[in-house]
Image (cartoon, rainbow, N blue to C red):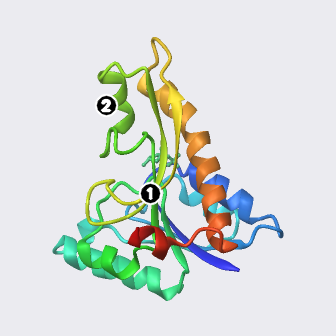
Amino acid sequence: MLSVVVLISGGGSNLRALLEAAADAEYPARIVAVGTDRPDAEGLRHAEEFGIPTFSVALSDFESRAAWGDELLNQIRQWQPDLTVLSGFMRLLPAGVVEALSPHLINTHPAFLPEFPGAHAVRDAVAAGATQTGASLIVVDNGVDTGPIIARERIAVEPGDTEAALHERIKPVERRLLIQAVLDIANGNLDLKELARA
Ligand code: GRF
């Protein structure tokens, strides 16, 4: 059984999809804890609904990003996860945290990487007048959305698409890629160490 910690910052709809998948006894992964940098993150309610422990480590409580990162890593390590998933986690992790967790550290991104990296991928795609974008799942490295690609899928940008409308069409694809990737990792069909070495 693969144990997974999920980190969020917002609504957690992707987290919820993973919680629902993991609630199925046949699914070989369990979410053991949900962490956030935002104690008020809406998505924590999904963890509470499924009875999953939560923790929050707010950057503002620390003297430095490094100290914040150390505490976040401590909290994650308490759960001894096989995998840590960033899903709507809107902070860049300090290098020490990435070194400690990657390649068993993956991130969902609402674009067809390497197109539109960064925190405003959907807005950037709309602003660029792109006719297509996508959803991606990557191994986190020390760049911004530059890690090895686990999976990605194209999504059309419709004429007149707002950022919100497009993002709501991207998220279900992210969820499907995430649920499949966690399944593949759990059943040994996807070796993150191998992918990261490639
Ligand atoms: C997702 O599109 C994720 O890729 C991006 O932020 C969004 C989070 O959505 N980083 P939610 O919080 O899972 O609803």
Q: What's the CA distance linking mark 1 and mark 2?
A: 27 Å
Mark 1 and mark 2 in contact? Answer it, CB < 8 Å. Answer: no
In-front residue for pair 70/173: 173
Q: Which residue is mark 1?
A: 40
Say left or right for 175 vs 194: right
Decide which of 132, 174 is in the foreground and name it.
Answer: 132
Q: Is 161 placed above or below 195 here?
A: above
| Element assignment for label 2 | helix
- Quarter of image, res 142: bottom left
Taking 51 as reference, is 99 left or right?
Answer: left
- Quadrant for residue 52, please give it: bottom right
Q: Residue 124, image x and y in percent?
A: 31, 31
Q: In this view of the protein, which residue sits in the foreground, 65 or 86?
A: 86
In the picture as drawn, the residue positioned furthest to the top comes out as 159
Residue 157 in percent (x, y) is at 48, 22
Residue at image coords 65%, 65%: 184
Residue ID for mark 2? 124
